[in-house]
Image (cartoon, rainbow, N blue to C red):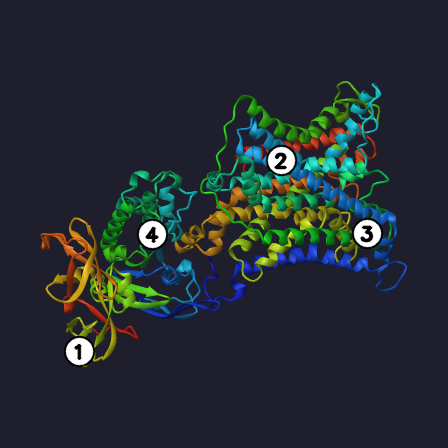
Amino acid sequence: MLKRKNTTIPLYMDPWFWVKLIVFVIFALFLVWPFSSIITNAFKSTKVDGFTLANFQRFFTKKYYFGALWNSIGISLVPTLFSVVLGVPMAYLMTRYNVWGKKLWHVLAILSLMSPPFLGAYAWIMLFGRSGSVTTFLANFGITIPTIYGFGGISTVLALKLYPYIYMYTSGAMESIDSSLEECAENLGSGKFRRLMTVTLPVVTPSITAGALVVFMSALADFGTPMLLGGQEFRTLPVLIYNEYLSETGGNGNLASAISIIIVIITLAMLAVQKGYVSRRNYIMSALRPPKEIEVHGFKRFLVTLPVFLISFISFLPQIVVCASSFQHTNYSNFIGGFTFENYQNLGTRLWSSLRNTFSYSLIAMVFIVVIGILMSYAIVRKKGKTGGLLDMLLMAPYVIPGSVLGLCYIVTFNVKPLILTGTGAIIIISYIIRKLPYTVRSSSAFLQQMDPSVEEASINLGVAPMKTFWKVTARLMLPGVFSGAILSWVTCINELSCSIMLSSGRNNTLTIEAYTNIVRNSVGSGAALSAILTVTSAVILIIALRVTKGKIRV
Amino acid sequence: MSNEVIIKDAVKKYGDFIALKGVSLDIREGEFFTLLGPSGCGKTTLLRMIAGFNSIEGGEFYFGDKLINAVPAHKRDIGMVFQNYAIFPHLTVEENVAYGLKARKVPKAEIAPRVKEALELVQIAHLAKRKPNELSGGQQQRVALARAFVIEPSVLLMDEPLSNLDAKLRVQMRTVIKKLQRKLGITTIYVTHDQEEALAISDRIAVMKDGVIMQIGSPTEIYAKPQNPFVAGFIGVSNFLDCTVKKDGVVDIDGQLEIRPPLAKAYEGPAKLSARPEQLFFSESGLPGEIMFSTFLGDFIEYEVRLADGQNLIVNEYTKDTSEVHADGEKVFLNFDPNRISIYEAESEEVITC
């Protein structure tokens, strides 16, 4: 409890007052204001003056739009359930058994979660698409496989990409169950399965729902996958926002704004449901004795390893497929085999400009994210005050507002005076900061919460002023937490698509946008080469970071 | 500036909850002063107000004649030892100890010898280059001590510094602390909930309860003359008995025993008597009781004696004063030395014995 030092010191003398003020101003300017302008926008129309419900009326009466709502809910709910089915057993096996190659499967799970947003869809098209390699191979034998376009394919791809959220949230909770709890259940005569169903699972359920919420929100917000696999028939809300905005040329995106609000309402509703559920079941646990790994041998060990291997390998497969394909000859829109570097050689200047954009934008954003992240997490954990809760809430906002919605917000807000930013790299950087800051703040605050405040007090007590103590001791000690959060912020910045694609004017294209654009244009060779570069870059960063932090990166 | 600490009517509030209800203390220069009380009594709150980590809702805090209410924590020139040591984990032992000296802009040439001297005083000079995670609890404790006194503070504060150590080390370290404090002569304010530790280490003790000071005095005063039943019960073991003080100052216990203790004020009516187990003795007459249980503890024997009204009293009899152990079930009579018991008014709980 580090209260403000003395009642006699006025507010404006407290540096933390200014820190909070600056953070509020940033969020007000780049989140609250843009979002409120699309709210007003949604109730306007080019055809009528003043307030109108025309946009919503159009949305709910035309099947073209309305159908997308059901599609979106479907491709959010189904992957969520599917992720739970994959993630929970994997978490159980990984935390309780001596699975072979445990570390590798864990790394693969992180890598697939942090892969470019369109990569899964793209790889699946390469394999099982209309002219995919597996499809054509099987066609030789007269075998046809179910289509991967539409609902089923999108759900599968999203589940395989997002299940690691469930796996990580659940395994985190399973690791913190004190082993005496399960031993007690056993002691009371409960068998292994019964114990799992009556003690272990109920206790970790709040964490599973937290993971499920993140999966739901990510699937709902996903833009790359339905764009590639949805085709003309299967549209989701983020795709509609993008299309509507593009087609309403010169318009103010009134209908797109209305759709944005509908998405945000859905995410808020899910958030409320999850919070409501968890608030009644909050088990605070600290494992004095973390559960021990069960040693199994021979065939049994194979049995516990197999499911983990299958899940993590299949979800990682797209990255292998894309990298391997990038070395094949192409006849522009098809891979035709062989081995070549020509896809890379043909990239030319596009590669360098997109690489330069990716790294300059993401690194500039990282400077802000790290500085604001350190200050903000400290303000949230140690200087809560009356505004700490509000700060915490602002951090949820980027989860609730999908990238394409924020992109629209920025286009609508920042293409008019006083602040014209559209078409600049600055606006992409700002969107990175607002959307990816939470990773760093959450990781830093979690770390800070474990830190004993008396270390700071000792420094102040020894004569070092509070703010100097903060930079000299606290920030220094927080670094591991900041680092692991910042790595996630950075990698997700590099792979950001849904927001930056709306904000980019072509010459601001990042590697992700460039790769995606090439794939959509069916320029498969360049697409694969760019995707491979992107994937390998992210993987290298993550693997180095996992090495440095000894695996302490939590999503 | 003299290094006494004077606190006048200190008040601490957390919202509607009043944690300190106007506490006044006068801590002398060079004194080892302990704030003792159960958890939640406000002792740590008060210590943190002195250190400057808690806001002050009322009252005045002086170091010597200097009012320090508005002086920020880092300018108060106080050494502090924290409950969990609060060693900087990223610095070595000597860097930890040098930290405060550097902050005070002590010349470099002077820092090294002072750090060395401080480490030698707490007998860990050989660990100077170690990182905190390579130290045991007791060694970390010594680093925390050296770091606090090396800056030659006007006041040294200690917040339950021994509570994280095991029992044996605790006893050893409290002697280290006491001897060091004597040697350096730093005014020291020490917080603990352990009454035995407080008795062993302090020059004077303030016993606190619910944000109020119950008694201030030397360990012997507090033990021998508790000013109220709370202090009597909190420090050591006390037996409590209901009694009546008659007009002539005679104290009547249950109509079975009359004693005449020296009274400091005139009082008549219901009262409460407290007596330490070693101040009760078996005699020919007195309160009739029955031995329920006895524990032989080497230098004394502890008896549980049940009185006629069903109340149990603890009686200690020193082995050197007796030749036999009373058997369970034996009928005995209990008596007191009237000069060594305390009597309190039943209602106000104020002490009336001298």
Q: Amino acid at mark 4?
A: Pro
Residue named by callout 3: A256
Q: Amino acid at mark 1?
A: Gly
When the figure is inspected, residue A334 is found, relative to residue B40, above or below; the finding is: above
Per the image, label 1 sits on a secondary structure element best described as: loop
Classify mark 2: residues with Cα within 10 Å, few (<14), some (14-19) or many (20+).
Answer: many
Q: Amino acid at mark 2?
A: Ile
On whether disc 2 and disc 1 are found on a single subunit, the reply is no
Earlier along the polypeptide chain: callout 1 or callout 4? 4
Residue named by callout 2: A110
Of tags 1 and 4, the one toward the viewer is 1
Per the image, label 4 sits on a secondary structure element best described as: loop
Chain where mark 3 sits = A
On whether disc 4 and disc 2 are found on a single subunit, the reply is no
Classify mark 4: residues with Cα within 10 Å, few (<14), some (14-19) or many (20+).
Answer: many
Picture disc at residue B249: 1
Classify mark 3: residues with Cα within 10 Å, few (<14), some (14-19) or many (20+).
Answer: many
Chain where mark 2 sits = A
Chain where mark 4 sits = B
Q: Label 4, label 2: how many angstroms apart (C-alpha)?
A: 44 Å
Of tags 3 and 1, the one toward the viewer is 1
| Residue A420 visible in this rendered orientation of the protein | no
Is A332 left or right of A319, judged from the image as shown? Answer: right
Residue named by callout 4: B161
Residue B168: which quarter of the image? top left
The percent coordinates of residue A408 (x first, y second) are 77, 50
Identify the image quadrant of the C terminus of chain B: bottom left
The percent coordinates of residue A481 (x first, y second) are 53, 43
On whether disc 3 and disc 4 are found on a single subunit, the reply is no
Q: Tags 2 and 1 in contact by the CB under 8 Å rule?
A: no
Residue occupying image coordinates x 86% and y 40%: A233
Identify the image quadrant of the N terminus of chain B: bottom left
